[in-house]
Amino acid sequence: MNLDKTMRMNYLYDFYQSLLTPKQRSYMSLYYLEDYSLGEIAEEFDVSRQAVYDNIKRTETMLEQYEEKLLLLKKFQERQQLVLQLKSILDETQASDEIKQIVDTIEKLD
Amino acid sequence: MNLDKTMRMNYLYDFYQSLLTPKQRSYMSLYYLEDYSLGEIAEEFDVSRQAVYDNIKRTETMLEQYEEKLLLLKKFQERQQLVLQLKSILDETQASDEIKQIVDTIEKLD
């Protein structure tokens, strides 16, 4: 499996899973999060390997289309970059715990 | 027009307009952003007032359903609250311009 693609699909799945059907969510989470093979998923759901493959491909396309429109992953990465920059400056300047706490909270938001 | 609802629809429209059809976008932006009446929109597009009303109602429901699933407005408001908290502390502690600049950039992200 292509690792970059796997990471990207994991992220996109995180952001957009609420827009998928239950079946799409099942196949995607088994394939991308739990590392099942297409054959194992096919057996689990008693469908053909080809059916699983087609469903996952279609779901991947949908996730990329949602990202094209809403840019949630891109915006998240921009925010994270700024927060990391901020944290490194705050570390140098020995900012107060109160400030650090708020920045940590912002960092944890998706 | 209910002002609270208008503000909420403006926000939801901002976040989710990319998921609407061109017609939905036209009606919503005329009605909510440019303050056209249903009758004026109907005239502009040469359709019935009822057709415009139904389309706008359906679009409002769609926007609320997207918000239920993706929570972009809710998360945006949470982030903004934290950023404002941070800004007020930074003002008190006379933080460096570099820090203020990064926080301002984070504030401007949607």
Image: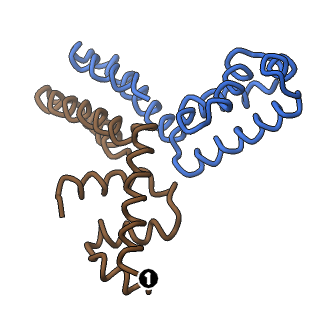
Chain colours: A brown, B blue
Task: Kindly identify the residue that appears in the image at 34 percent across and 17 percent down.
Answer: B91
The amino acid at mark 1 is Val
**Residue receiving disc 1:** A47
Q: Secondary structure at mark 1?
A: loop
Q: Quadrant of residue A50?
A: bottom left
Q: Position of residue B94 (x, y in %)?
A: 27, 15
Question: Looking at this view, is B109 or A43 the one in front?
Answer: A43
Q: Position of residue B109 (x, y in %)?
A: 39, 26
Q: Is residue A83 left or right of residue A44?
A: left
Q: Is residue B35 left or right of residue A82?
A: right
Task: Kindly identify the residue that appears in the image at 32 percent across and 37 percent down.
Answer: A74
Q: Is residue B89 left or right of residue A93?
A: right
Q: Quadrant of residue B61?
A: top right
Residue placed furthest toward the left: A92
Q: Position of residue A2 (x, y in %)?
A: 17, 59
Q: Is residue A67 left or right of residue A1?
A: right
Image mark 1: chain: A
Task: Kindly identify the residue that appears in the image at 33 percent across and 39 percent down.
Answer: A76
Question: Looking at this view, is B80 or B110 the one in front?
Answer: B110
Position of residue B109 relative to residue B44, above or below, is: below
Task: Kindly identify the residue that appears in the image at 53 percent across and 64 percent down.
Answer: A21
